[in-house]
Structures are given as C-alpha cells and as structure tokens.
Amino acid sequence: MSIEEDPTTPSTEPSSTSTASVSAPLSRWGERTLALGGVFQSALLVQQLATSGHLNQGDLSTATHSLFEQNPDVISDVYGGTEKILAGLMLLRDTLNRVNTPNGNDIVRYVMGMVHLQKKLMKQSDMLNTVGKRIEQAQRQADLFDPTHENVVASLADIYTSTISTFSFRIQVNGDYNYLQQTRIANQIRVLLFAGIRSAILWRQVGGSRLQVILQRKQLINSADHLIKQAKEQQLQR
C-alpha cells in the first residue's frame, strides 16, 4: 500500500550533544560521497521503517544529529562519524555498481525525491530561515530530553510538515498501512526524509551534482570503497 507523506498520511540540521568525530578532513570526493551516502541511508531507513515498523535507535540518533549539527569542523561530524553512514555508503556503492537490492526501486525513488526537494527548498530563503529557527528551538528541547525523545522527533516532524511538505511535489512512501498510520512511525519517517534532504543540501554544498553520478561513477565507487573501509575500521575501534 502507498501513502503520501503529508500531515494526514504517513511519510517524512545534526546534534551538538553527540560526540564529535576526530577523523581527518576528507578529500572533496570523499565529502561528496559521504553526503550522498547520507541521502541513501535516509532512503534505506524510510523503506525499512515503512515496511517493518522498526527503526534502530542509533540510526534515528544519527538522523537527528545530522539535523542539529549546523557548524561541523569536518563533514563527518554532521553524522557523528563516517561509521554512522556505513549502511548508506554500502547501498550507494551497490547502486552505482548496478547490484540488485530488495526494494531498490523505491529506495532510488526516495533518493531522487529528496534531491528534488532539496533543490526546491534552497530556492525559498524565507522557508530556509524558518526551518533554521525552528531547528534551534528543537535543539533546546533535545538538550532537555534526548535527541531521539518522542517529543523531539515530533517537533522535527512538524517542521518538515509545515515547511517542506507544503511543496506541490511530495515523496510517496510505500509500506504497510498498519505501520504508516501510526503517528510515531509517521513522525520518524518525516524526520528521516528531513535528514535525507539535509544530506542532499550538504552534497550540493560540497560540489555534488547529478552529472557526476552519471559521468564520474567510477570515481564515486572508488571513493565509496575507501570510506567503507575507513568506516569499518572505525567501528572496530569503538
């Protein structure tokens, strides 16, 4: 069953409270690859949550962190470390290598939708200012509770609903209606989409483009391979 991510039907900047990454700055290609991996990870988590009703708290924390972190020293700080985007990087690499993945069509559609919404959002300066101010308010709420607290997630979802969801283009999320009709899951989906759009903005800011994905696919794959190896090493050190 499919539904749209609006206030009545389910679908959906990272946190200064989390531990900062100590990773060295990435190359320009590394930055682009990591940011695009963030978009793919959000798409993957939306698909998994919509069909299974389950979202790992660590993945939700990474998403909220990416929304609250506005002034990172290095790009990996947006996510709290490269290892936090391992699943997205692996999915990005598999997609570029044209490996068939379960529900791959939906995931790619979510990615394209988030990139499209990022482009529309960046043209709306007033909306961007509103989003920024309301994220600051949600950050203060997160400082009192926890970045993944239900109230914080609801506040971030409401920002998405009252701003990005007002565009005529909306991402249609496919999944199990029994899960999608639940307010908690609908809010989490909106936060994941919000985080994916944040990653898409970051991707554009570091020079990412659709043309690169088409014409420089091999370089993206090599960069993803390098980051995946790095992320796995970081996981072993934690």
Image (cartoon, rainbow, N blue to C red):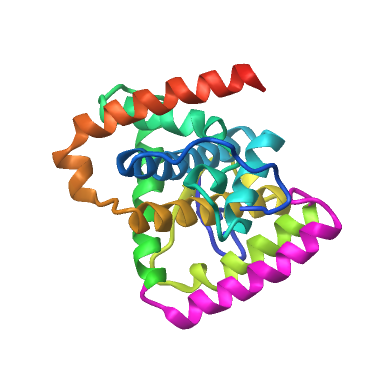
Question: On the picture, is 108 further left or further right than 174?
Answer: left
The reply to whether residue 213 is in sight is yes
The residue positioned 68% from the left and 54% from the top of the image is 16
Callout count? 0
Indicate yes or no whether the magenta region holds residue 140.
yes
**In x, y percent, where is residue 86?**
50, 29
Using the image, determine if residue 143 lies above or below residue 60.
below
Q: Quadrant of residue 9?
A: bottom right
Q: Is residue 54 visible?
A: no
Residue 151 relative to residue 101: left or right: right
Q: Residue 201: give x, y in percent of width and height.
A: 41, 58
Residue 19 falls in image quadrant: top right
Residue 112, placed above or below residue 238: below
Name the residue located 67 percent from the left edge and 33 percent from the top edge.
56
Q: Quadrant of residue 161?
A: bottom right
Residue sticking out furthest to the left: 215
Which residue is drawn at the image coordinates 34% and 56% (left, top)? 204
- Which residues, given as a range, are shown in magenta? 123-149
Residue lying furthest right: 144
Quadrant of the image containing the C terminus: top right
Most common secondary structure along the magenta stretch:
helix
Tell me: 55 left or right of 174.
right
In the picture, measured across the screen, residue 145 lies left or right of residue 108, that is: right
